[in-house]
Image: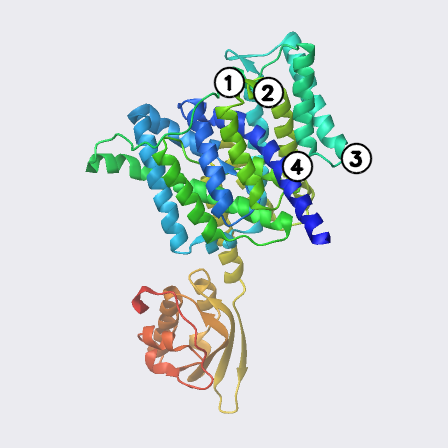
Amino acid sequence: MLQNRLSRLAIKTDVLSGMTVALALVPEAIAFALIAHVSPLTGLYAAFFICLITALFGGRPGMISGATGALAVVMVSLVQQHGVEYLFTSVVLMGVFQLLFGALKLGKFIRMVPYSVMLGFVNGLAIVIFLAQFGHFKLAGHWMNGQQLLVMGGLIALTMAIIYLLPRVTTVIPSALAAILIVAALVAGLGIDTKTVGDMGSIAGGLPQFHIPQIPLTLETLYIIVPYSLILATIGLIESLLTLTLVDEITDSRGQPNRESLAQGAANVVAGFFATMGGCAMIGQSMININNGARHRLSGVVAALLLLGFILFLSRWIEMIPLAALVGLMFVVSQKTFAWSSLQALRKIPRQDAIIVVGVTLITVFTDLAIAVLCGVVFAALVFAWQHARQITVRTRSDGHDWKIYELEGSLFFASVANFSELFTPRNDPPHVVIEFRRARVMDHSAIEAIDTLALRYQQLGKTLHLRHLSPDCLELLDKAKGMVEVDEFEDPHYRIADNKLG
């Protein structure tokens, strides 16, 4: 009985949340379509296909996908230079690349993105969502002023107040959906003159039609679309998988990155063959859905089907919704998405992590999401390498036979080889020297070269070097020091070294 009640409650939550998301998808899809220089319906159909397919088959129930601005800014140059048919072909190929990514099970690597990069990504997109709303404060390319601006601001404030305050009174209906309906009814009932969804473009249309892109099948065409498709696929996967990780943290659950990659790819292949602009996960709409309590696939399916219903049957009514209501909703989304606790944490976390958070945030805002994440990961990797390079240490002792023993501890790799060579004093050492690698690990070819170089230094001084507890990989790769390795099959470690000679 209790389970049935919970099930009914979950269905109700998902349906109402899906309605809210559908309304929020409309202006975003139209705006991104206009950025990409395609018709509003191209963006709306894209949102329908991407949202529906990823909701049904994706690896993260509750996450919402659709047409996004991150992809639109890449698409615009392709459309301007070569035409919209090349865009549709690029979207199909983009989906193929994403399918390959998922089939090769590469989605797991998103778990390697440092938390500091995640914070920067979230904060950057929250700022981008916030700034994007100011485009709605323009009329015919000019900023609003006077009464129009006051009306717009007042309706936005009312929307935000309802979203924040209604949950204190009732949770029967999502506060975001209630705010949109109340503000829309107020504008219609009082005849208030303000911008509406219809001012952005008509959303009336029929069912999407299957369409094979009309382009010449030549190598030249391939040279044009492959770079765009790779960039689109990369940006789409990064935004989708990072959003998936964020939703995982909020819901304390675990999504499936590889399955999500496959779903994103399949959705874009289908979208391309139905003459749309494709898409990826949308952090704003996903946050609306999750904050409303939706946790299942039904919410995304409802949002997609309602979006198609708006196009087919309800376009006249949807076009009457005041943009102020949707802008207010997105302002709340950006406020809730931004990790405000990170501002206080900047004073407490290591300086390099603070630099990554701020850097990724700024790069996301001023350039591109993919570039921001790549820069953050590279910087974090370099910091990691530098920190571990400094952690290689040695303790020395002498045995009863006047042999000097170096007990090495740490990771020996490209970044630590300089410190490694400075730990030894061949000229002052006795005739027999032992380097003990029991607490150390040799990581790459640079480390092998460093050991060979050290062995040569001892050889030139006529001294004997003994290397203990190295892995079989080390023995295979060593050159000058190969004869100095003392093999102990029972105690020697067995680990792999990153070196092309071994594979």
Say which amino acid is labelled 1.
Met
Q: Classify residue 104 as left or right of residue 441.
A: left
Distance in Å between CA atoms under marks 1 and 4: 26 Å
Left/right of residue 214 with respect to residue 433 in the rendered view = left
Q: Is residue 424 positioned above or below 483 on the image?
A: above
Q: Position of residue 105 (x, y in %)?
A: 42, 56
* First reached walking from the N terminus: tag 2 or tag 1: 1
Disc 2 to disc 3, how far (Cα)?
25 Å
Residue 168: numbered disc: 3
Numbered disc in front, either 2 or 4: 2
Residue found at the very far top of the displayed protein: 146
Residue at numbered disc 1: 200
Earlier-in-chain disc, 2 versus 4: 2
Q: Secondary structure at mark 3?
A: helix
Q: Is residue 385 above or below residue 203?
A: below
Q: Which residue is mark 2?
A: 323
Residue in front for this viewpoint, 395 or 152? 152
Query: Which comes sooner in the sequence, label 2 or label 3?
Result: 3
Q: Earlier in the sequence, mark 1 or mark 4?
A: 1
Point out the tag, 4 or 3, that comes first from the N-terminus: 3
| Helix, strand or loop at mark 2 | helix
Q: Give the amino acid type for the residue marked by disc 2 in the picture.
A: Leu
